[in-house]
Amino acid sequence: MLFVEVFRFLFVLVGAWAGLEIGHHVGTSSHGPIIGMLLGAAILYVVGGIVGRLLDRGLLRSVFLLRNMPPGEVFAASITATTGLLVGMVVSLPLLTLFGSGVDVLVTAVVCWVLGALGWRIGAVKGRQVVASAGLSRILAPPVDPPPGYALLVDSSAVMDRFLLVLGHAGLLPGGLVIPQFVVDQVRTQADGPDPVSSRRARRGLESIEALREFGVSVHVAPDEIPEVDDPTVKLLTVARRLGLRIGTCTSRVVEQAGDWDLAAVDLRRVAGELTPDHTPGERLTVDLTKAGRQPRQAVGYLPDGDMVVVNDALHLVGAHGVNVTVSSTRPTNQGLMVFAHLTVDAGVGGDVEGHAPSDSTNGSPRQIP
């Protein structure tokens, strides 16, 4: 309302001045200028209110339309529109100088308006190029990819785990992923390394990146190398601060250091652990036993979701498939949930044994295979 009232007041002043001038030239009595001033002020009071409200709505509409326009394009459009107005004035200046009639003023106004509108449209369309040519890209036109705010900056531990693939498949990564180039190099190095477990996890992580792209998740590889820093964690935190992104990791050390840097970080393993229901004691599971445990007579297997199952007194069943076990207890670890179990009394082995024979149900010793 303040804008409308000020606009109306300016119209009233113009109307009063115009009415006063008309009263001086047309009026035959001494009261003519006063009457003309009052009539002009009254008429433009009404007209100013109408025009002011229409102009206020138009400005609000313009702000609404420009709300989602990138600042670089707004800046470029403003510059090019102003340039168009100045060019129009320069082009029309000879006409005003030579003739100085009212028609020339109208022609000048039309030329300035057309060139100004043309400049605005050119700036809106070519805004990024204009800003880049002016050297203001980092200030006014930051890269669209990665998308700010909702993208997740991940380290090698997150890339090599399964959680990102699950989140992407479920559509829970709307902002996409940002992977620094040095993180990609770390994963590739581990994929070619001698450790079979780390190598397998790294290859799975590289395959997951391509799978996420197929799911429609935006995966941006940030070229930031940070050569002045050697610590990969510090490199990651530096990139996160530069881009203003959250960090996704499966390492508690990264989360702790991110807290020291006042950066947002999420531990994907902790989130998965809170979402995954605990295996309660007494629950029966079926697991493939793949290797011996650290303690005597222990065998180790893995559930389909990757959780490790340690089975007591099952060393003789290493290599067996579909072993029925009963949960004794669970313990969360940095590598996920660890399940401790024992062989189910009334259950056997659901598959064949590679290198070992299944035990006899009567005495617990391996049966000899003829």
Image (cartoon, rainbow, N blue to C red):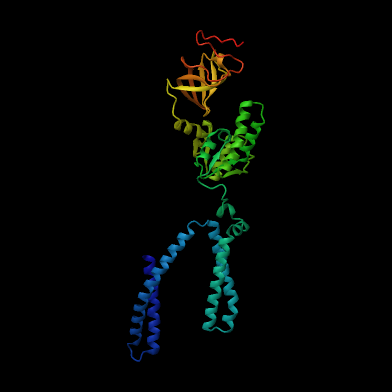
The quarter of the picture where the N terminus appears is bottom left
Query: Position of 196 compared to 102: left or right?
Result: right
Closer to the camera, 295 or 276? 276
Seen at 67% across and 26% down, the residue is 194
Please, which residue is most extreme toward the top here?
363
Residue that extends furthest to the bottom in the rendered view of this protein = 28
| Horizontal relation, residue 7 to residue 357: left or right | left
Q: Which quarter shows the C terminus?
A: top right
Q: Position of residue 172 (x, y in %)?
A: 49, 41
Above or below, 71 relative to 157: below
Q: Position of residue 39 (x, y in %)?
A: 34, 81
Q: Quadrant of residue 52?
A: bottom left
Front residue of 47/190: it is 190
Q: What residue sits 40% from the left and 69% below the top?
A: 54
Residue 132 locus on image (x, y percent): 61, 56
Q: Is residue 359 above or below residue 14?
A: above
Q: Spot the residue most to the front.
A: 370
- Where residue 58 appears, as percent x and y from the top left, is 44, 66
Comparing 293 with 235, the one in front is: 293
Would you place residue 33 above or below residue 127 in this image?
below
- Count the marks: 0
Res. 328 image quadrant: top left
